[in-house]
Image (cartoon, helix red, strand yellow):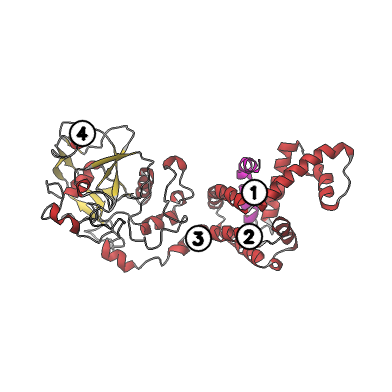
Amino acid sequence: DFQKLALDFQQSAISDFVGFTTKGERYPLIHTISELRFRVFSEKLGINRKAETKACSLHRTYGVAVPNAQKKFCEDYDTLVELAKTSIAQTSFFEKIYLAAEPALLNEIERQRARDAVRVWIRQKLNCLNEEYRCGRDERKMIKRVTNFETKILKTYLRILTNLDKKLFPEEQTATFIQTKDLETLCGFVDSVTKNTPKPGMLLIDPGKFKMGSLKGLPAEHPVREVQLDGFWIDKCEVTNYQYLRVAAQHPFLRKSTFPRKFHDGNYLRNWSDDLVPEIGSELKPVVQVSWYAARHYCNYVGKRLASEAEWEMAARAGIESEYSVEGGVEFLRDYGWYRENSGGIIHATGQKISNPNGLFDIHGNVWEWVYDWFGIYPNPNSTNPQGPEIGKYRILRGGSWSDPAEYLRSAMRRDALPTSTYNNVGFRCAAKK
């Protein structure tokens, strides 16, 4: 079928198109289609030269009679041409095929450093699609033959080209997303680097010992053990949609359409409407629907890493051995975090509640946070800089969320999840070595 044909010849067609565009060919798409037709006919019809289909082409275009010896060959030729023509004319089918190929197209454009050249071509095509007499004669004929300038088909092509232009130059889409002042006030995302705060938006946790786990909690929280940790940095706030957007704009690997399927469960950034379009009004809310792999890749890209489970609990406890690092106990928890009883059933902007004594916002509630470790039973001995099991099936989540009861926000509370999982109440914050 046409979908299989498109997949089989996708990479060669993409490479041809970007190459023709970079060389300044006037009609790169027409040249690409010509080369693509020859490859398809070579494989499906067994031809070695383009001229071998001349009789078939003359018959389709001008009604010239086909020699008897070529009738069967031209029937097969017509079948392939009609399959392509009718498939491309079905907007939903064409769009599905294009979207499947778009990640490879974006990668090839980056590989050949062709963003500017492709943008020029896109702008020319947008003019042509908006007004048929603003494009070359040959191109106008091709577009008319495929679309007949039908409104529905034209709108699909316009939308695809407009979105491609945005994805090629994402920095233009994010320049004035929110006010910098808000970021400074909330979490220091754009703090100036000073001697005392060399990592903007992060807090330094001094080396020391603490008691990890809980005697009263779930079995997975036992036994309580003394842990010694080196000093480390940790984000003041959970990573927001705005921060994630800025990184995705610079790092296409993390975009909704290009992040490899093996690294998520199919719902990655499900609440974003496109690669660079988070949910309206969610800029300062923690990013969710991200897998452990996505969280790790983000942190690594910005020069950080995920916190170990021990680091997370030490930062959360802030020297307090009770169930919550909250002054006054659980009765005052609602002043420090969002959970089922006070969230109203939604995620909230980060940094709206009181920080814990270490200066960390939303360490209790709002969203669960991925940490580095595999899930496993705590070993009995005390330890130094523990990293959890060497292998496992599940990674660990910490902190509780807007949808959970108060007891899930305890400093020792642990939850496990497949590293490919994405949930609407799971995000992350990053850490870094001192």
Residue at image mark 1: 16
Badge 2 is on which residue?
Answer: 152
Q: Main secondary structure of the magenta part?
A: helix
Q: Position of residue 91 (x, y in %)?
A: 62, 54
Q: CB under 8 Å between callouts 3 and 1?
A: no
Mark before the other along the chain sequence, 4 or 1: 1
- The alpha-carbon separation of the residues under discs 3 and 2 comes to 26 Å
Residue 214 vs 301, above or below: the answer is above
Rounded to the nearest whole Å, what is the CA distance between mark 3 and mark 1?
A: 22 Å
| Quadrant position of residue 278 | bottom left
Q: Is residue 173 left or right of residue 182?
A: right
| Nearer mark to the viewer, of 4 and 2 | 2
Q: Secondary structure at mark 4?
A: loop
Q: Are marks 4 and 3 in contact (CB under 8 Å)?
A: no
User: How far separated are the C-alphas under marks 2 and 1?
Assistant: 28 Å
| Amino acid type shown at disc 2 | Lys
Residues in magenta, as a range: 1-21
Whether residue 418 appears in magenta in the rendering, the answer is no
State the residue in front, 121 or 242: 242
The residue indicated by pointer 4 is: 378
- Residue 23 in the figure: left or right of residue 203: right
Measured as percent of width and height from the top left, residue 134 is found at: 69, 68
